[in-house]
Image: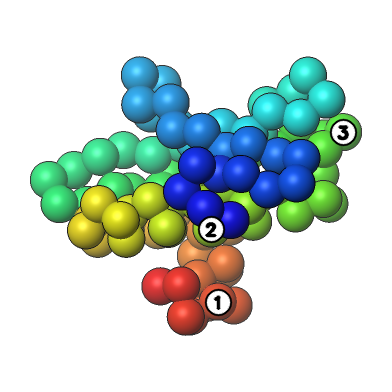
Amino acid sequence: MDLNGTTADVNVRDNPDAGRYELTREGRTAILAYRREPGAIALVHTFVPPPLRARGLAKRLVAFALADARGRGERVIPECPFVQAYIEKHPEEA
């Protein structure tokens, strides 16, 4: 996935006004909420609507957020349990 969030049929976008990354599919939006701090981003909550679950969308959101933080030179504060688990399973992205 590139920093534009482009994959075959899914687009992740940063919505800084709402403080979240978003991924819309089938008219529903999955989110990864964040809080920016000086030199860091706290990833605080992931939510995927029930009809979209078990499709890897939360993973796409987290992967995008981590790539975005790397690109900005920000330290990641993984407050969300899903983000914590993702980083543990993918230490190469930490």
For mark 3, does the 10 Å Cα neighbourhood hold few (<14), some (14 to 19), or many (20 or more) residues?
few
Q: Earlier in the sequence, mark 1 or mark 2?
A: 2
Q: Relative to the observer, which residue lies in front, 73 or 75?
A: 73
Residue plotted at (18% across, 43% down) = 37
Q: Secondary structure at mark 3?
A: helix
- Residue drawn 39% across the image and 39% down it: 34
When the figure is inspected, residue 88 is found, relative to residue 42, above or below; the finding is below
Disc 1 + disc 2, Cβ < 8 Å: yes
Question: To which residue does mark 3 refer?
Answer: 51
Mark 1 = which residue? Answer: 90
Residue 63 bears which disc, if any? 2
Q: Is residue 27 visible?
A: yes
User: Does label 3 or label 2 sit earlier along the sequence?
Assistant: 3
Q: Amino acid at mark 2?
A: Ala
- Residue 87 position (above or below residue 13): below
Q: Quadrant of the N terminus?
A: bottom right
Amino acid at pointer 3? Pro
Instruction: Identify the secondary structure beneath mark 2.
Output: helix
